[in-house]
Amino acid sequence: MMKKLFLLLFIGYSLFAKAEPIKLHPENPHYFMYKGKPLLIVTSAEHYGSILNLAFDYIKYLNTMQKDGMNYTRIFTGSMYWEIEGDFGITHNTLAPKAGTALAPWKRSSVSENTNGGNKFDMDQWDEAYFKRLKSFVEEAQKRDIIVEVTLFTSIYNDKTWGNCPVHPQNNINQIAITEYKKVHTLDNGNLLSYQEKFVQKMVEELNGFDNVIYEIQNEPWSDQAAARHKPNVWEKSALDNWSSRIELASDASLEWQAHMVDLIVKTEKSLKNKHLIAQNYCNILYSIPNVHPDVSILNFHYAWPEAITYNYGWNNVIGFDESGFAGSEDDTYRQQAWVFVIAGGGLFNNLDYSFAVGYEDGTLVQKAPGGGSPTLRKQLLILRKFFEQFDFIKFAPDHDLIVLAPDAYAYAISNKKTEFAIYMIGNANSLILKLPKGEYNAKWINPSDGSVISTQTIKAGKQFTPLNIPEFQTDIALSLVKR
């Protein structure tokens, strides 16, 4: 009888544990816990249009992601923004539905002449077809153990995209008073604020039952509410008018609005069963964040350098490289970005994968775009994740003392400081000097591009430095060291 009771209690506990939403790992909040297990997020995913683009076959897409071992996808909600074909130099853009077909949270009215085609929106009525598609997508992702970042809002980049937005006065029948897009994501936005609040509450209520959801407040908030521009460091010579070489921060007005939305999510979930993680997107490249809202758990950067981790590790939150994809089409670039960021201590990497598009939900399109993405890249990112998961990585932290010298290479290390060490290098190095605890280690060198083992050896570390000869490699190489 007692055995049966214990078994029932164990099964009940297991079911409860599986139903708990993704959270920061309690032993090491620089990583996630999902379904009771540590989780590192590494992915190459479509350009955020899975929900709002009705022509996009999300089942086929999610099947591809599952087959390729990707565990994260990011979606825009269509609440404030979608793009026009050709924006940002993207030929086939999932975030640019055909005119008049874009799905938004609100029903279309009987009034015509929406700038983007079709009828104007009635923001006093929810479109149940939208929420049905949204929940179906999240549910199907959940079945495949894919985490969904629901980006509630996104910046409006210029007057052209502002004219395309559903909340633009021309595109709805609700007499939205605001006419300046730079005020949309501030508390000084007139009657639009109440609609934004209702939308956030509706989203949080509709998605509360899912365990694979993360909320991000706003994509690139500095783009329509910039406070200041900085160079990444005092040696940077690039001009400040080049977005890829400057740090641009959101204004105080933007930060106040974002904090208001964070508070609203927390308040709404207070009476609901589940509590979900909240992410905030800070800037491109790097920055030492001065203040983090106590209910924000993920610090997201775009086009990030590893210093974004170094400067913010002490906040004890996951640090994410939440968007890459504007550095050309070569797989090597994004593979190396991912390895560097993860071995430097990041807990999330997401590449914009332009091989996904309408009609190419299997991720095989080769198109004109500012970035890349391919089945090969996704395979390489899975190699990274499996390499990392071979360790008890919850005990890991960036190890700035391990590598004494790595001549002619950029080298990064992470470890538990005692028995497990991981190193990643880019360059032409043939030697490496390490500062290891005394003992014997199993060393394995791997090729990050195909996962093959280049060589294995036993290393004996003494009281002083430990020199290693690096086997011949192309471009980049990874090393695992495990104490015997």
Image (cartoon, grey):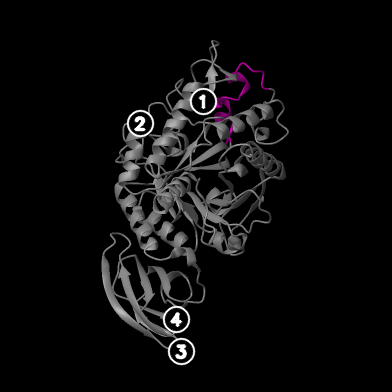
Nearer-N-terminus badge (2/4): 2
Residue at image location 32% in from the left, 39% down from the top: 63
The residue beneath circle 2 is 57
**Left or right: 52, with 166 as reference point:** left
- Could you say which is closer to the camera, residue 300 or residue 118? 300
Which quadrant would residue 343 be assigned to in this image?
bottom left
319 in relation to 471, above or below: above
Per the image, label 1 sits on a secondary structure element best described as loop
Q: Which quadrant of the rendered structure holds the C terminus?
A: bottom left
Estimate how packed mark 4 is, as few (under 14), some (14 to 19) or many (20 or more) residues with alpha carbons within 10 Å: many
**Left or right: 8, with 449 as reference point:** right
The residue beneath circle 1 is 104
186 in relation to 435, above or below: above
Q: Is residue 85 visible?
A: no
The residue beneath circle 4 is 436
385 in relation to 15, above or below: below
Estimate how packed mark 3 is, as few (under 14), some (14 to 19) or many (20 or more) residues with alpha carbons within 10 Å: few
Q: CA distance from mark 2 to mark 4?
A: 51 Å
Per the image, label 2 sits on a secondary structure element best described as loop
Q: Which residues are magenta?
A: 156-176
The residue beneath circle 3 is 463
Of labels 3 and 1, the one closer to you: 3
Nearer-N-terminus badge (3/1): 1
